[in-house]
Image (cartoon, rainbow, N blue to C red):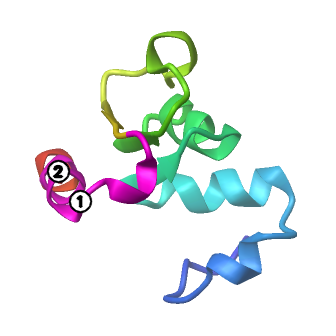
Amino acid sequence: MLPPPQPGMFASLIDEPLLHVAHYLQQCSCYIGNDSGITHLAAMLGVPTVALFGPTEPANWRPIGPTVTIIQKHPLQTLPVEPVLTAVLHHL
């Protein structure tokens, strides 16, 4: 059994096997991520997910699920924190 997630554990997940990452994701109250495989995994596991998209077209590449919120801003660096926080609070 893996230990529970700890603050600051992001660096420790970089080289973790995908099954370990999935285990940690299942313990999340909400996941925030960019357009990536891990974001799709979180959504697939049923974790409330806020998926951030820049220039990639969400209509083609969005994660699927009843608890997925898509936020798009191009360039992504100009996305203010408020809509992300609002989406997270909606899921909690």
Dot 2, crowdedness within 10 Å: few (<14), some or many (≥20)? few
Dot 1, crowdedness within 10 Å: few (<14), some or many (≥20)? few
Q: Nearer the viewer, residue 48 or 1?
A: 48
Identify whether 13 is placed above or below 20. Answer: below
**Badge 1 element:** loop
Image x and y of residue 73, in percent: 35, 40
User: Which disc is residue 80 wearing?
Assistant: 1
Q: Residue at x 44, y 46 (%)?
A: 75
Q: Nearer the viewer, residue 1 or 51?
A: 51
Quadrant of the rendered image containing residue 35: top right
Identify whether 19 is placed above or below 61. Answer: below
Say whether residue 6 is left or right of residue 28.
right
Quick check: is 37 in the magenta stretch?
no
Q: Nearer the viewer, mark 1 or mark 2?
A: 1
Q: Which residue is mark 2?
A: 83
Q: Which residues are magenta?
A: 74-87
Image x and y of residue 43, in percent: 49, 34
Hey, what amino acid is under mark 1? Answer: Pro
Tell whether label 2 touches label 1 (CB within 8 Å): yes
Hey, what amino acid is under mark 2? Answer: Pro
Q: Residue at x 50, y 19 (%)?
A: 57
Identify whether 49 is placed above or below 14. Answer: above
Say whether residue 21 is left or right of residue 55.
right
Quick check: is 80 in the magenta stretch?
yes
Q: Nearer the viewer, residue 84 or 6?
A: 84
Q: Residue at x 52, y 52 (%)?
A: 26
Say whether residue 51 is left or right of residue 80.
right
